[in-house]
Amino acid sequence: MTALDPPPPYLSLDPTARRLRLDPRDERFYQNPYEAYGWLHGQGSTFFWEEFGYWCFGGCDDVNRLLRDRRFGRQNPAGIPDSRGVSADRSHLKSFDAIEANSMLELEPPVHTRLRTLVNRAFVSRQVEWLRPRIEALANELIDAFPAGGTVDLLPAFATPLPITIISEMLGVPVTMGPQLLDWSHRMVAMYTHGRTRETEEIANRATQEFSDFLRRYVAERKRQPGDDLLSLLIAAQENGQKLSEDELISSTMLLLNAGHEATVHQAGNAVRAVLAQGGDPRRFFASAEATAATVEECLRFDAPLHLFTRYAYDDMEVAPGVTVKSGEQIGLLLGMANRDPKAFAEPGSFLPDRADQKNVSFGAGIHFCIGAPLARLELQVALKVLFDRQPHLALAEEPRFRDTWHFHGLERLVVRT
C-alpha cells in the first residue's frame, strides 16, 4: 500500500497529530497486520497509538536505533513492573511481580549486566551447536508419529514439543513436565495481552506461584545432587565471586523456559505457513546449509513471532522530529512492522531468502538482544529442513488463522495433509 491509498477500514490516523486509532484485537488486523503496516509506512512509520497510550515506531532504522539507545530501558524508573495491572492495586500480583523484579529482561545495568553475564556464561558454555544431532533426532521422532496419508496439526505435533523438549533437557527439568510448563507459560504470557481482565491477572499470578514452587523444589534437588545440566551450571556460575541469588535463579530459569519455546513455537508455525505459501517443492529452500540459514532468516523477517517491544524513557527528550517523551513514559517498537519497511527492504512483502538486504530485528538489539537467539536459529534450521525433507508434499488442509494475541504473533492451528 502507498500513502495515496485509502487506509484499511479498521484504522484511522490523524495525519497532523499523528494519532492512530486501531484496536489490536480487531480480527481484521491481527489476522494480517501487514496490511496496516504497509499503509502506515506510507504515512511516516511513527505515530501515537491511542489504544496503548504511547508513541510507536515502525521504521527499521528507528527501531534499530531505539533498541540500542541507552536513554531508554526496560526498567520502569517508577519501579512499577512493565506489565501494569488493570488498577493501581497490585496485591493480587505478588508472585508475578516477584518474578518480574528479578528478570533480566526487565532490568537495566548494573544488575542486568551481572545477571546476563552469569546466565550467558552457563548458557554459552553448552555451545548450542552440539545440540544439532539431538534436535534432528527429535524432529524425526515427531514426524514418525504423524498419521500416514492423513491430517495433523503441526503446532501440538511438531512445533511445540520440539523446543519445549530441548530447553527442558538442557535445564535438566523432566521432559514429562512439558505440558505443565506450557500451561504455566501460556497463563503468564497472557499478562501482556492488550485489554486483559482481573481474572487473567489472578490466573497468571497463580501460575507464576505454582511454577516458582516447582522450580524451587527442583533447584534444591540440584544443589544436593548437581548434574551436567544448565540448571546445575546456573547454580554454580560465578562472576567476580558473585553468584545468582535463589530469587534471581528462579526468575532466570523461568525466563529461559518460557522464552525457550514461546517465540520458537510461533516462528516455526509462521515459517511453515510462509514456505508452503510459495508453492512448488519446499526442499529447494533447504538444499544446503547456506540456503537453510538464509531461509530461516527470511522467515524471521517475513513473519516474526514478536511484534511489539516496549521501553521506558529515562529522561525528557525529543525522540524523533516532532516527537517528545517525558521521563517514565513508554514507547513501542514495532518489530514486525520494521521487518517490512520498504525503506530497508526491496519488495518487503515478498518471501525472498536470497535477498541482498537480508536482516531483521526479530531478536531485538542492544543489551537486551535475545540470549537464546543461537538456539532458536539452530532449532528452526534443523527442524524445518527435516520436516520438508521428510514431507516434501506437505500441504495445508485448512487456511491457518492467527491467535487473538497480536504482539505474540502465532497461529491457532496449522493443520496439514501429510
Image: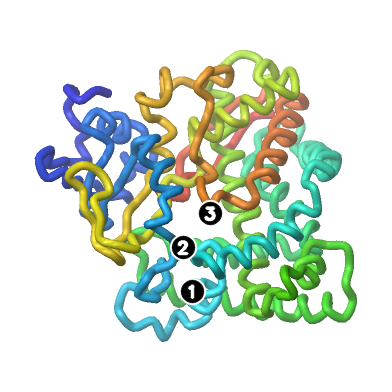
Classify 10 Å Cα crowding around label 3: few (below 14), some (14-19), many (20 and above). Answer: some
Mark 3–mark 1 Cα distance, whole angstroms, equals: 28 Å
Secondary structure type for disc 3: helix
Tags 2 and 1 in contact by the CB under 8 Å rule? yes
The residue sitting at 59% across, 63% down in the picture is: 113
Where, by quadrant of the figure, is residue 144 drawn? Answer: top right
Between disc 3 and disc 1, whose residue precedes?
Answer: 1
Reading the image, the residue beneath label 1 is 203
Depth check, front residue: 208 or 128: 128
Tags 3 and 2 in contact by the CB under 8 Å rule? no
Mark 3–mark 2 Cα distance, whole angstroms, equals: 21 Å
Secondary structure type for disc 2: helix
Mark 2–mark 1 Cα distance, whole angstroms, equals: 9 Å
Please say whether residue 9 is visible from this viewpoint. yes
Secondary structure type for disc 1: helix
Between disc 3 and disc 2, whose residue precedes?
Answer: 2
Q: Which mark is residue 368?
A: 3
In the rendered structure, which amino acid carries the disc numbered 3? His
Classify 10 Å Cα crowding around label 2: few (below 14), some (14-19), many (20 and above). Answer: some
Instruction: Using residue 30 as the reference point, say whether residue 362 is left or right of it.
Output: right
The residue sitting at 79% across, 47% down in the picture is: 127
Depth check, front residue: 47 or 143: 47
The residue sitting at 27% across, 23% down in the picture is: 1
- Foreground mark, 3 or 2, reads 3
In the rendered structure, which amino acid carries the disc numbered 2? Ala
Reading the image, the residue beneath label 2 is 190
Q: Position of residue 373 (x, y in %)?
A: 63, 45
The residue sitting at 50% across, 34% down in the picture is: 360
Question: Please, which residue is most extreme toward the front here?
Answer: 240
In the rendered structure, which amino acid carries the disc numbered 1? Ile
Instruction: Using residue 314 as the reference point, say whether residue 180 is left or right of it.
Output: right
Between disc 2 and disc 1, whose residue precedes?
Answer: 2
